[in-house]
Amino acid sequence: MTQYRVLVGIDYPPDKRAESGTIVSDIPEKSAKWLLEQGLIESSDGKAKKIEPVIEPEVTFDPKATDGDKDGFVQDGTEFQRSVEETN
C-alpha cells in the first residue's frame, strides 16, 4: 500500500484526520490523486508531484480595444472595462 506524508492537516474518509508530518497509508486512491495535485500530501519517498503555479497575464489599458463578444463593453472583467461609446 502506498504511503503518503501529510503536508497540512487533512480530513479524509471515513471520518479520519491526519496532521502535518504524519505518514499514512489508508488514504483512498481517488482522494490521494487530488490531494497530491493540490500539494497537500506527497509520496513518503519524497517524490511529490510538482504543480506549476498559474501566472495571470498582465492586463494593460488598450485604447483601441474591440468588443469581441458584442456585449457593449471592451476589456470586460478588468479595471479598464468601459462601454463601447467611451472608446469612440
Image (cartoon, grey):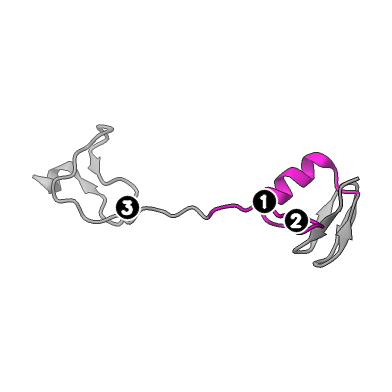
Quadrant of res 59: bottom left
Residue type beneath disc 2: Glu
Q: Secondary structure at mark 3?
A: loop
Q: Residue furthest top?
A: 70
Q: Residue at x 76, y 59 (%)?
A: 46
Along the viewing direction, whichever of 84 and 50 lies nearer the viewer: 50
Closer to the observer: label 2 or label 3?
Answer: 2
Which residue in the protein does label 2 denote? 42
Distance of label 2 from label 3 (alpha carbons): 37 Å
Asked if disc 2 and disc 1 are in contact, CB closer than 8 Å, the reply is: yes
Q: Secondary structure at mark 1?
A: loop
Q: Position of residue 9 (x, y in %)?
A: 79, 63
Q: Position of residue 16 (x, y in %)?
A: 90, 54
The tag earlier along the polypeptide, 2 or 3, is 2
Q: Residue furthest left?
A: 88
Q: Is residue 47 magenta?
A: yes
Residue type beneath disc 3: Thr
The tag earlier along the polypeptide, 2 or 1, is 2
Which residue in the protein does label 1 denote? 49
Q: Residue at x 91, y 45 (%)?
A: 1
Q: Residue at x 19, y 39 (%)?
A: 66
Q: Residue at x 44, y 55 (%)?
A: 55
Q: Which residues are magenta?
A: 26-52
| Crowdedness near tag 1: few (<14), some (14–19) or many (≥20) residues, C-alpha within 10 Å | some
Closer to the observer: label 3 or label 1?
Answer: 1
Quarter of the C terminus within the rendering: top left
Looking at the rendered structure, which numbered label has been put on residue 69?
A: none
Locate residue 4 relative to residue 61 in the image: left or right.
right
Residue type beneath disc 1: Lys
Q: Secondary structure at mark 2?
A: strand
Looking at the rendered structure, which numbered label has been put on residue 78?
A: 3
Q: Position of residue 17 (x, y in %)?
A: 87, 59
